[in-house]
């Protein structure tokens, strides 16, 4: 019994994209990661997204984030490696900039210094928490949020920074090709303001104890700060390229984890300079960052949809196609789960073919696509691929216990959750009746009914089968036994919550 409940993904004819060098080399977008995964054999993969927190997120920002969660889900399945999303909130974005009227030196204050830790936390909660919780649930992917302020205070980041400082002559033209002056901002300890271009910030001493800088404050005159890996003070505010260099070098020292930098496509140009600096530092190939560039959202002129452009030029630069939620996604006219489901659907469609994913989209085209989404979504369910013989046993209601290793996506499964089993284009939906966790397959079979896992095989045969699927390092994650009951598709399509009907804000007349 196979239920063509939700059909296959990939709407025929929805998207037209030309071929490209990269798309031509890949069957599927996820294949881009394969050479690194095979070379590094990591224990886990973390998808890293950094976002400035100066204002409400726009569509381009949420697109990168959605791609990170969705790729984490796909990579977990594809490579049988646990994955998560690491979100970096860049609270060092400038909050205010002033000019010294006498010397014309520019001074700036970061969001962290202007608002403080608690207010920054409230901003992140307000803009991102509900969105990430919903994405996390929709993709079965864990996430962590950290701020730049937290990163720069960590010994690992500071030690890495000090190591790059020893080689500053080798990297400074990569980080500042026009003048060779790297912007290391060390805010005044008395007021938190720093020279924007670090014009008068000088490195005066560098030894095994750390680095000492002198700088000049607008209000407090000359001051001196000392950066030491063991101390989380004073604040170290690195300009974008330098920050990325230090962050990526530090990630590269973690052999067990592959970090995948998720970046909007406009970053592809800037990464040449980061790569130049990584090369100048002699970064070994295995420690070079893996990066995935995501589709850019473009205005009709081909310029990136950008809040700073809006602030500078006013709304006049925007085409009529731009809906309010594209610039401030908290204005989406339905709830956050609906917005997330739409984005996950959209990015899922883009990922069906590398030609669609590794390209850019105008605002107008994205508006068209989001309008073309199905008006009802499949219900949110944990997804699991399964072999045909087990799929058929579940369909016949003969298999009522499913066994998996307890990786991060399984840890979210609880009684009442839904699981969608997929096999060769067919799928069926089950409801979780109970969850039991064990340290090994042996222990699991000491407690679970062998016949409920598979009525056709003995305990010994099943153990042998399971261990062919899961190597010891996967079993070491622990084992979860999931009681399942088939959900009757007739009772679920309309009323029991297996299909959600969503409003279609994209179809509303343009405002
Ligand atoms: Zn000061």
Image: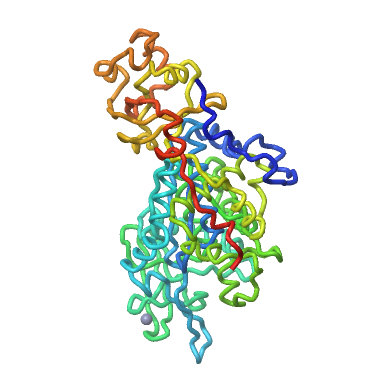
Specify whether 377 is left or right of 322: left
Observer-nearest of 406 and 255: 406
Instruction: Point out residue 231 in the picture as x, y percentages from the top left corner.
Output: 31, 61
Instruction: Point out residue 170 in the picture as x, y percentages from the top left corner.
Output: 57, 59
Residue 230 visible in image: yes
Identity of the residue furthest to the bottom in this view: 102
**Eyeballing the image, is 398 above or below 479?**
above
Residue at position x 44%, y 48% in the image? 135
**Residue 257 occupies quadrant:** top left
Residue 255 visible in image: no
Residue at position x 62%, y 45% in the image? 350
Specify whether 277 is left or right of 451: right
**Eyeballing the image, is 333 above or below 501?**
below
**Eyeballing the image, is 463 above or below 261?**
above
Question: Whereabouts is ligand 1, in terms of quadrant?
Answer: bottom left
Specify whether 500 is left or right of 170: left
- Which quadrant, please, contains the C terminus? bottom right
* Coloration of the structure image: rainbow
Observer-nearest of 358 and 314: 314
Residue at position x 48%, y 41% in the image? 72
**Residue 172 occupies quadrant:** bottom right
Observer-nearest of 100 and 453: 453
Instruction: Point out residue 196 in the picture as x, y percentages from the top left corner.
Output: 49, 76
Identity of the residue furthest to the left in this view: 447
């Amino acid at each position: 019994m196979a239920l063509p409940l939700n059909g296959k993904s990939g709407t025929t004819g929805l998207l037209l994209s030309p071929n490209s060098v990269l798309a031509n080399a890949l069957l599927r977008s996820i294949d881009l990661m394969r050479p690194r995964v095979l070379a590094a054999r990591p224990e886990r993969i973390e998808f890293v997204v950094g976002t400035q927190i100066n204002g409400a997120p726009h569509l381009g920002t949420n697109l990168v984030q959605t791609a990170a969660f969705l790729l984490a889900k796909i990579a977990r399945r594809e490579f049988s490696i646990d994955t998560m999303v690491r979100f970096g909130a860049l609270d060092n974005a400038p909050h205010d900039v002033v000019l010294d009227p006498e010397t014309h030196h520019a001074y700036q204050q970061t969001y962290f210094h202007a608002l403080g830790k608690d207010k920054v936390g409230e901003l992140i909660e307000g803009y991102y928490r509900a969105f990430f919780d919903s994405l996390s649930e929709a993709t079965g992917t864990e996430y962590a949020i950290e701020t730049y302020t937290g990163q720069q205070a960590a010994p690992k980041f500071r030690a890495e920074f000090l190591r790059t400082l020893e080689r500053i002559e080798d990297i400074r033209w990569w980080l500042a090709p026009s003048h060779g002056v790297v912007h290391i901002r060390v805010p005044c300890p008395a007021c938190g303001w720093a020279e924007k271009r670090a014009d008068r910030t000088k490195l005066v001493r560098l030894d095994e104890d750390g680095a000492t800088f002198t700088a000049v404050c607008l209000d407090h005159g000359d001051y001196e700060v000392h950066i030491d890996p063991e101390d989380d003070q004073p604040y170290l505010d690195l300009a974008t390229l330098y920050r990325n260099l230090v962050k990526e070098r530090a990630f590269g020292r973690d052999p067990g984890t592959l970090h995948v930098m998720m970046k909007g496509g406009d970053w592809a140009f800037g990464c040449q300079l980061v790569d130049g600096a990584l090369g100048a530092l002699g970064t070994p190939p295995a420690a070079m960052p893996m990066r995935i560039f995501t589709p850019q959202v473009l205005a009709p002129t081909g310029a990136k949809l950008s809040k700073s452009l809006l602030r500078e030029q006013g709304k006049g630069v925007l085409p009529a196609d731009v809906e309010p939620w594209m610039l401030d996604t908290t204005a989406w006219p339905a709830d956050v789960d609906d917005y997330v489901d739409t984005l996950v659907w959209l990015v899922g469609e883009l990922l069906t073919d590398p030609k669609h994913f590794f390209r850019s989209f105008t605002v107008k085209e994205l508006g068209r696509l989001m309008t073309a989404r199905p008006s009802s979504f499949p219900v949110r369910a944990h997804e699991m691929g399964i072999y045909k013989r087990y799929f058929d046993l579940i369909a016949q209601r003969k298999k009522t216990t499913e066994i998996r290793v307890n990786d991060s996506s399984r840890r979210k499964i609880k009684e009442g959750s839904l699981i969608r089993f997929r096999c060769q284009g067919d799928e069926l939906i089950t409801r979780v009746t109970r969850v039991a966790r064990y340290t090994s397959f042996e222990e699991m079979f000491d407690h679970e009914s062998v016949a409920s896992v598979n009525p056709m095989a003995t305990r010994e045969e099943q153990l042998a089968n399971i261990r062919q699927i899961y190597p010891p390092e996967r079993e070491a994650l622990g084992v979860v036994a999931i009681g399942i009951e088939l959900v009757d598709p007739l009772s679920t399509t309309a009323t029991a919550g297996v299909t959600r009907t969503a409003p279609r804000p994209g179809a509303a007349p343009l405002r």
